Amino acid sequence: MFFLSETFLFGAVISTRYYILGVQRPEELNQALGLLITAVLLISSLTAYMSKSAAENGNQKSFVRNMVLTIALGLLYMFGVGYEWYEAYQQFPPHTIFGTMFFTTTGLHATHVFSGIILMIIVYFIIVYFKGRKAGAFGSSNYWGVEGAVKYWHFVDVA
């Protein structure tokens, strides 16, 4: 139900953008930057999957490495969005129609990415700092926390 409600939320925002503006976009829009930060986010989905697979197989070393990579790539994405917003604000500020839609859409997505990073950090701390692995928090028979966090991360990537 959660993913379904999130799908409707993103669908409403995206369809509103196309209803109001059609396929028009400003020439100044930095599509290369958008493509680059999207690629970073999609690569982070791969490292998140590898982290989940490592947790599923009880490989803590691989889990930690891939979870740290996922978090780092997520943070790199957020810095990229910050730079994208800086550029966008100069060209089409929020009080313009395109600016309003751009900042609403990217802001909604960035908020979800940020919450996904927080979720990944929580899972990482449970395993690494609270010795969750030894306490039975996550292992080859019980890795639902990692799997849930990674599914959310995949959803955010696709959105």
Image: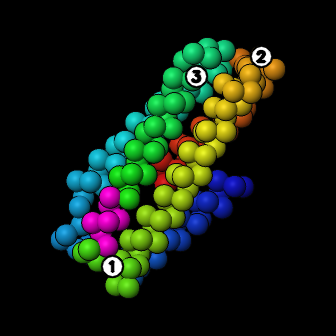
Q: On the picture, is 144 further left or further right than 14?
A: right
Magenta segment's dominant SS is helix
Tell me the element at label 3. helix
Residue at 67%, 32% in the rendered image: 125
Q: Which residue is mark 3?
A: 63
The residue type indicated by label 2 comes to Lys
For marks 2 and 3 on the same chain, the one whose residue lies earlier in the sequence: 3
Crowd tier of the residue under label 1, counting other residues whose Cα lies within 10 Å: few below 14, some 14–19, many 20 or above: some
The reply to whether residue 97 is in sight is: no
Secondary element at image label 2? helix
Residue where numbered disc 2 is placed: 134
- The Cα atoms of the two marked residues, 3 and 1, are separated by 41 Å
Q: Which mark is residue 93?
A: 1
What amino acid is at disc 1? Pro
User: Relative to residue 82, is residue 9 drawn left or right?
Assistant: right
Q: Is residue 19 magenta?
A: no
State which region is magenta: 83-89
Q: Earlier in the sequence, mark 3 or mark 1?
A: 3
Query: First in sequence: mark 2 or mark 1?
Result: 1
Front-most of residues 97 and 128: 128
